[in-house]
Image (tube, coloured by chain):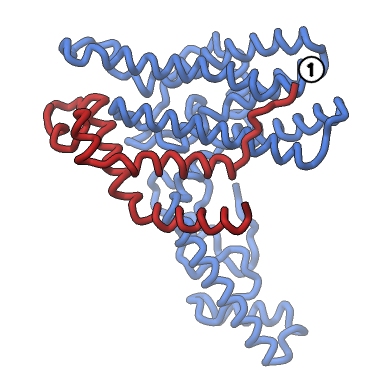
Amino acid sequence: RRDNMAFTLYSLIQAAILCVNAVAVLHEERFLSKIGWGVDQSVGGFGDEPGIKVQLMNLVRSVRTVMRVPLIAVNSVCIVLLLLFG
Amino acid sequence: MDLPHHGYRATKQRARAAPPTADSVLFEDTSSATPAMNSQGYYTPGYNMAGPPNDMQGGGGVNNLFTDPMANAAMMYGSSLANQGKDMVNKEISRFMSVNKLKYFFAVDTRYVLKKLMILMFPYTHQDWEVRYHRDTPLTPRQDVNAPDLYIPTMAFITYILLAGMALGIQKRFSPEVLGLCASTALVWIIIEVLVMLLSLYLLTVHSDLSTFDLIAYSGYKYVGMIFTVLCGLLFGSDGYYVALAWSSCALMFFIVRSLKMKILPSLSSDSMGTGSSAKPQLRLYITVATAVFQPIIIYWLTSHLVR
């Protein structure tokens, strides 16, 4: 019985790129506001404990803001490499 | 840890001139000394502040190499280039991770390693799990047995890879690619676990002082249990494997829960929070328990294919 989940670092990088792409395509107006996860709905509790949902929304928004430009570069490199080497 | 005393460098002077802060509990930090000094330099560059007399000494010691002035100039130029390269590399590396903080995790000695290994395998008699502080900085592993270190996880990881290679060789399934695959699989699982821990600590706004290196250290301690399990499996067969798996899983779960409880659940004893955050201590407890339960699962996953 062979270990069938043999990871390599390359598969980790692939998974990371896919996850970050998935977070980056969540549009603010069209999607996140509709399900109540927009940035205008996160300013609520000013206590010391923001809560999980607010933290998640902040995380999504910061990932989208920070990774927008690097993702363009990384995706282009991935597309070129996959076209060349299959 | 004493550096070798060459005749040129007065390392004793440098140790006395070092500020008596927390640096004194670590071993000598060569990166915080004056940048022109390198204690292992036989050939001193000309622009050094203690240059001229030592240059005479160096010239007198190996004068048969320096008779040719061109070779002399080339040697000094090359050593100055090497110094500049070293400074640049240090600067680049210290932008990503602070090397001083990494040195804290490797300041161990034999007594600490032995006690820590015993605690990892038999944590039920250890009384005091609190990490002691010294004027707001945590004590080095040399002085506090509860402090996490990175030496044991690194050595245990490498030993696990070698043991996996040996186990596969016993089963005649060995090839060099399998060794690399095993190593990268284990490394990826560590990265995944540390990322999940960081994510959950961020989402629940747990303001603990667990840095990334601390989490790497705590998730690397399971390799000690893994080595023990694989060894027992190799020596005593399948029964020995399951017995050792149960033993090291229980010990490791106890160790993780007791260690992380101190850091993640500080306010569990004082119930001063209102009903609004009554879910918080529960969620923090869930994180600790989930981390603990994850350890035996990953131990079984990573070692079962080594012991048939």
Residue B80: x %, y % from top left: 56, 77
Q: Quadrant of residue B177?
A: top right
Residue under the image location 64 percent in, 25 percent down: B224
**Chain ID for label 1?**
B
Which chain does the red colour mark? Answer: A
Residue name at image x 75 percent, y 38 percent: B179
Q: Residue at x 72, y 91 (%)?
A: B68
Which residue is rendered at x = 70% and y = 12% of the image? B244
Looking at this view, is B267 or B181 the one in front?
B181
User: Is residue B25 at least partly visible in the picture?
Assistant: no
Q: Which chain is blue?
A: B
Identify the element where label 1 is drawn: loop
**From the viewer's perspective, is residue B87 above or below residue A79?**
below
| Figure quadrant of residue B220 | top right
Where is B99 relative to B287, above or below?
Answer: below
Residue tagged by mark 1?
A: B308
In this view, the residue farthest toward the bottom is B69
Q: Could you tell me which quadrant the C terminus of chain B lies in? A: top right
Left or right placement of residue B307 versus residue B85 in this view: right
